[in-house]
Amino acid sequence: MTTTVITRIGSLVTNDPALGDGTALGLIQDAAVVIEDDRIAWVGPAAEAPAADTAYDAHGSAVIPGFVDSHSHLVFAGDRTAEFNARMSGRGYTAGGIRTTVAATRAASDAELEANLLRHLREARRQGTTTVETKSGYGLTVADEARALRIAAAHTEEVTYLGAHIVSPDYAEDPAAYVDLVTGEMLAACAPYARWVDVFCEKGAFDGDQARAILTAGAAAGLIPRVHANQLNHGPGVQLAVELAAASADHCTHLTDADVDALAQAAATTVATLLPGAEFSTRAPWPDARRLLDAGATVALSTDCNPGSSYTSSMPFCIALAVRDMGMTPDEALWSATAGGARALRRGDIGTLTPGARADLALLDAPSHVHLAYRPGVPLVSAVWQRGVRVAPQAPVA
């Protein structure tokens, strides 16, 4: 066993009220953390820290749990800069959106897809993210969806089957046949690589009945449901997520009072995962986090990193957006980006810095976590530990 003590921490976020100041963040001032192999062994006042094999001096910096990004789309190829530029310039754009990425992803080699995935995972890690969920959804054939998940599963434990991202262009004239494929042969090929099943329940993608069939089939194959819900319009996605005890309803931009009530009543089961990068990149209305929190819903924050509508891997950026435009406090936003993401992934071993939890943490070049929102755009993460190993900063890969 190898032990490391990180000492002289100015402010430690544990996300356990019983360990700290009684708030949701469980703050401990003038703190220390002891890591044993890949786990947290001890947290508390620095003056009481037990001896360890090695020591790291935080020099008064804040330490937080590693960010848990519970919604991303990282297995893709191609670039949609022209689409973003046109949207931000107020010009019409007639290219294919998701279909553009589907074509590029199908044409890419396995090595190209893996290299792009790894580049984005390293990018996220440098910014303090230690757990990443990612999805398929840019292949939309049996072979391409299965290879996307196989590639993802080699590098992250949180992998989601999203054959139901959109109706494949190959089935544009027969959506029902595509649903049959997604719930049949494609599901059988993909389930061995995935933990989750997801569906884009939205006008222009999959309606409530189609989404229910897809999620039910996925659950029968041993996958846990999550739902792209109520992003573009009011729709059945949130209610379906609650009905099927999905782990999360993601986006939640357009909610009725009944949707909010349903999420509040299902707070122990279904997390409302908000993705402000998508609203930033599309100039859409912001999700109302304050409304959800005040109702008692459990809220997570994630990046939705994808090449079309939210091309950011930065959880600190999403925290700043949530505080500035979604009614969250800095404390709430950080909790949602760490413990909230862990809840959305039904994980008890990440998102906290408590004895027994996985030793995933980030050190900030700042005395308090509040600086994540107070100093938006500034690269505050100065060191990252993942599974007890210091993994950042590191030299960039050519």
Image (cartoon, helix red, strand yellow):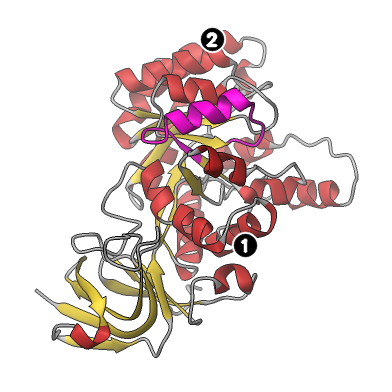
Judge whether residue 102 is colored magenta.
no
Label for residue 292?
A: none
| Amino acid at dot 2 | Ala
Q: Is residue 397 left or right of residue 256?
A: left
| Residue underneath mark 2 | 177
Q: Is residue 326 left or right of residue 191?
A: right
How many marks the image carries: the answer is 2
Residue appearing at x 23%, y 82% in the figure = 5
Residue appearing at x 67%, y 32% in the figure = 254
Residue appearing at x 48%, y 33% in the figure = 264
What is the secondary structure assignment of the residue under circle 2?
helix
Position of the N terminus by quadrant: bottom left
| Amino acid at dot 1 | Ala
Q: Earlier in the sequence, mark 2 or mark 1?
A: 2
Residue appearing at x 53%, y 33% in the figure = 139
Location of residue 131 in the rendering, given as x and y in whole percent from the top left corner? 38, 55
User: From the viewer's perspective, is residue 105 above or below residue 180?
Assistant: below
Q: Nearer the viewer, residue 316 or 139?
A: 316
Judge whether residue 260 is colored magenta.
yes
| Residue underneath mark 1 | 320
Q: Nearer the viewer, residue 222 or 376?
A: 376
Q: Nearer the viewer, residue 120 or 207?
A: 207
**Foreground label between 2 and 1:** 1
| Range drawn in magenta | 252-272
User: Alpha-carbon neighbours of circle 1 within 10 Å: few (<14), some, or many (≥20)?
Assistant: many
Location of residue 37 in the rendering, given as x and y in whole percent from the top left corner? 17, 70
Kindly tell me whether residue 158 is visible in this rendering: yes
What is the secondary structure assignment of the residue under circle 1?
helix
Location of residue 300 in the rendering, given as x and y in whole percent from the top left corner? 48, 47
Kindly tell me whether residue 163 is visible in this rendering: no
| Residue 171 occupies quadrant | top right
